[in-house]
Image: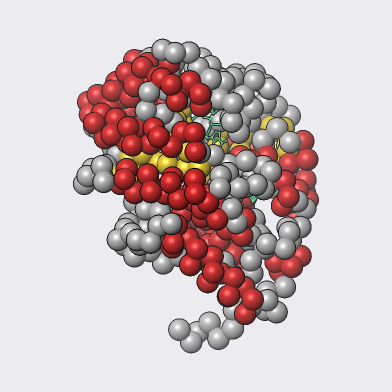
């Protein structure tokens, strides 16, 4: 059992902190159980917490991952949502294709189930529609891998030229030099889903060929060289999905990323949809300890970080970490490779959470439609991911949704 509390940036994770955080939430939840009737109406199980915990950090977290601050920087949209019940999305994630060259057994995308690809002609008009609505970023995401779209470079360029910020996750294997140069000149960030320290774990997690890991590493070196050459500041990171049988590669992956010159390695637990813990207590302790060892590799220009709420879930198996009403769908949505707009990244491919079809309607028609309202008013929280990657945002938004008295007495 870990006894040491970290002297930490807020994004560094501590199991003991997680436990005390959840204990505090439970206490507060019990104390307020008669105050917040709203959560009682959620189609959520009894783990719904009526008092969201937004943890005050000891020191400022890595800016890229300061989710609370990022959301609050869109106060104009939050105010509009509170006053009118609706606002334009800040971010729209686009899956340009559902195709992927990898076969990760734990993929939460549509790996192998769908291959739809959006023609570049529709992406050109779509980007204009999003700019007109006031969308501020359009990252490329993941039913598949963005690098499998034949016009990736053009997509990045037209998005950038329309004044919409972009960036993307990729397994990194297929990127070729001209595209890498465009990435360095157009993207705000790129994150390689590395998930391994060498071919063995990489093959286990990505189901790719034996050579894939080395190709990914070579491309990471190319991206680093291209971003040095370009005058644009692009944040360059890697991701590491962890579970007991992949934890041994965390340290080597962190070292590799640091040595190539990346800005960070983001370590996150795999999530599932079955509400079950990922591992037992001993394994969770071992992962957190390994995370602490990885943090010794940090420098002024390289960080190792983890999302606290997802590590809370890993460490405790407690779904309470996400037990607040979902409001983040007012600020972000997801367009699949099938040109359908979905409530969020976790509901891509579900007809019941399909807000509309961009092959028949404009984005604006879908966003301001009655169908969208009906869908978000009837979310069944049992359908949600465990834990939802948006939980930190929903916790902030629940503060705006809570009754408040004597607000002028600070
Ligand atoms: C579905 S992938 C699509 C983009 C790209 N193909 C990739 O793998 O980065 C989008 C993100 O989901 C993450 N992801 C995939 N399966 C996951 C799982 N079971 N649990 C948590 N994250 C997962 C990946 O690491 C990646 O960051
Ligand atoms: S690389 Fe990404 S989209 Fe492809 S199978 Fe793996 S997680 Fe899924
Ligand atoms: S899975 Fe989707 S609908 Fe459910 S809480 Fe998360 S963002 Fe909201």
Q: Position of residue 52 (x, y in %)?
A: 57, 66
Query: In the rendered view of the protein, which quadrant contains the N terminus?
Result: bottom left
Looking at the picture, how far across and down is residue 187, in whole percent?
Answer: 38, 32
Colouring used for the render: secondary structure
Q: Above or below — where is 60 with respect to 97?
A: below
Q: Is residue 328 left or right of residue 261?
A: right
Query: What residue is shown at x 25% (from left), y 42% (from top)?
Result: 297
Q: Residue at x 47, y 42 (%)?
A: 268
Res. 119 image quadrant: top right
340 vs 222, left or right, is: right
Side (left or right) of 337 relative to 223? right
- Quadrant of the image occupied by residue 279: top right
Quarter of the picture for ligand 2?
Answer: top right
From where the camera sits, is residue 83 visible? no
Between residue 104 and residue 132, name the one nearer to us. Answer: 104
Q: Nearer the viewer, residue 81 or 19?
A: 19
Is residue 315 visible to the viewer in this orientation of the structure?
yes
Residue 343 relative to residue 236: left or right: right
Residue at point 44% right, 62% down? 16
Number of numbered discs on residues: 0
Q: Position of residue 69 (x, y in %)?
A: 42, 58
Quarter of the image with the C terminus is bottom left
Closest to the observer, 350 or 47: 47
Above-or-below relation of 301 to 127: below
Residue 259 horizontal/vertical position (percent): 24, 31
């Amino acid at each position: 059992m870990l006894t040491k509390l970290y002297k930490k940036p807020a994004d560094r994770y501590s199991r003991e902190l997680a436990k005390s955080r959840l204990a505090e939430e439970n206490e507060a939840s019990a104390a307020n159980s008669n105050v917040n009737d709203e959560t009682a109406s959620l189609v959520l199980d009894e783990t719904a917490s009526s008092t969201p915990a937004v943890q005050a950090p000891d020191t400022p977290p890595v800016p890229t991952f300061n989710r609370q601050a990022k959301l609050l920087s869109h106060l104009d949209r939050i105010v509009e949502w509170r006053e009118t019940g609706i606002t334009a999305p800040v971010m729209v994630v686009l899956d340009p294709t559902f195709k992927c060259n990898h076969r990760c057994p734990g993929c939460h995308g549509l790996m192998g189930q769908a291959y739809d690809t959006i023609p570049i002609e529709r992406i050109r008009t779509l980007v204009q529609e999003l700019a007109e609505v006031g969308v501020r970023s359009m990252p490329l995401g993941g039913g598949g891998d963005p690098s499998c779209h034949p016009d990736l470079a053009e997509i990045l360029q037209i998005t950038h030229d329309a004044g919409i910020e972009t960036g993307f996750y990729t397994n990194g294997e297929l990127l070729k030099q001209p595209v890498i140069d465009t990435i360095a000149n157009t993207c705000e960030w790129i994150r390689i889903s590395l998930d391994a320290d060498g071919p063995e774990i990489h093959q286990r997690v990505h189901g790719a060929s034996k050579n894939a890991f080395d190709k990914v590493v070579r491309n990471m070196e190319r991206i680093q060289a291209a971003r040095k050459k370009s005058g644009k500041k692009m944040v360059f990171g890697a991701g590491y999905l962890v579970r007991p049988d992949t934890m041994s590669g965390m340290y080597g992956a962190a070292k590799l990323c640091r040595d190539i010159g990346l800005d960070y390695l983001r370590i996150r637990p795999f999530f599932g949809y079955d509400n079950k813990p990922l591992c037992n207590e001993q394994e969770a302790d071992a992962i957190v300890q390994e995370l602490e060892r990885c943090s010794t590799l940090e420098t002024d220009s390289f960080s190792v970080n983890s999302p606290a709420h997802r590590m809370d879930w890993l460490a405790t198996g407690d779904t309470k970490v996400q037990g607040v009403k979902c409001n983040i769908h007012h600020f972000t949505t997801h367009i699949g490779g099938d040109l359908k707009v979905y409530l969020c990244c976790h509901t891509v491919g579900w007809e019941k959470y399909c807000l509309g079809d961009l092959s028949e309607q404009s984005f604006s028609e879908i966003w301001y439609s009655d169908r969208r309202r009906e869908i978000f008013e009837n979310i069944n929280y049992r359908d949600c991911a465990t834990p939802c990657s948006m939980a930190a945002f929903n916790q902030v938004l629940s503060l705006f949704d809570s009754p408040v008295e004597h607000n002028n007495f600070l």
